[in-house]
Image (cartoon, helix red, strand yellow):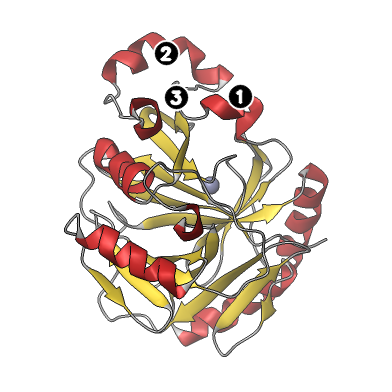
Amino acid sequence: MKLEGLHHVTAITGDAPRNVDFYARLLGLRFVKKTVNFDQPQAYHLYYGDERGSPGSIMTFFEFSNARSGRAGAGMVHSVGWRVGSADALAFWERRLAAEGVVAELGDGVLRFDDPEGLTNVLIAADAPDPPLAAASADIPADHAIQGFHGVRAYAPEDAIAATVPQLEAIGMQRDGDRRWTAGGAERRGHLVWDPAPAEPGIEGAGSVHHIAWNAADDAELVAWRERVQEAGGHPTTVRDRTYFHSIYFRVPAGVLFELATRDIGFHADEPVEHLGEALKLPPQHEHLRETLERTLTPLPNPRVAA
Ligand code: ZN
């Protein structure tokens, strides 16, 4: 039993239309699912990913309209790392982002930039054996497309990291660097790097990461992982039905909210792969709200339908 890297990363946006424009059009991710926050159905939950909505490629956003601006601090993920195929791809993205006025900083094998709400994304020319998870986009050459998650970086103080180690070990993560931990399965690897926390406290808000989800197989694994986390002193939730996956959640002592999500259901559960992201999809418990939600939720562009 091994986690296959990251399943998804969920952040907060205060501006859903601009968020769709940035992630689906500019970054060329596929708009995989337009649904609502199951716990607060008045708000969107938007999913972006590769062509098929594969776990390992899924960036999601809760829309909290007019959310205050967030800031990553201790106990929070501060950047999301994506793989690209080569240094040439980094040069392509530097040009593409610059043409839209997005300032990007090119470093050694990485290109760093913020989304419109300040969430840091990093493209990494990583030499990873994992199969690429890319979306097709009319104006992005296939060689340069984003290929799924490499990993995330989070801020935490030393003592909190030390207190988190038993729970990282309980879910099979391995330390493979001074501050880097890896969830590595048969096909995919996902990394979590702890960085020293800034003095300023974090603010959960627009542009901040809400939680990170690791990729589990099915309910049987969730139950088994849940027991291991409990034995390591964690307090996981019961298994939750998220329609496209089942999940457990637990906040590690370092402050980051972890989720383990299953890959056995998928985003094609309620619409065919060729039409992912086109219609507002609601879970059965919120279907009675459809008429109201279709009137009150902000209309969103779908770059693929428009193209
Ligand atoms: Zn989640």
Q: Nearer the viewer, residue 67 or 229?
A: 67
- Find residue 272 and name its label: 1
Q: Nearer the viewer, mark 2 or mark 3?
A: 3
Q: Nearer the viewer, residue 147 or 218?
A: 147
x, y percent for residue 244: 62, 34
x, y percent for residue 17: 26, 36
Q: Is residue 260 above or below residue 85?
A: above
Residue 143 seen = yes
Q: Which residue is mark 3?
A: 278
Q: Secondary structure at mark 1?
A: loop
Please tell me which of labels 2 and 3 falls first in the chain.
3
Q: Residue at position x 50%, y 59% from top? A: 143
Please tell me which of labels 1 and 3 falls first in the chain.
1
Please state which amino acid type lies under the numbered disc 1: Pro
Q: Residues within 10 Å of mark 2 (few under 14, many from 20)?
A: some
- Find residue 71 and name its label: none
Q: Which residue is mark 2?
A: 290
Q: Secondary structure at mark 2?
A: helix
Distance Cα–Cα, label 2 vs label 1: 20 Å
Please state which amino acid type lies under the numbered disc 2: Arg
The answer to which quarter of the image holds residue 77 is bottom left
Distance Cα–Cα, label 1 vs label 3: 10 Å
Q: Residue at position x 52%, y 25% from top? A: 275
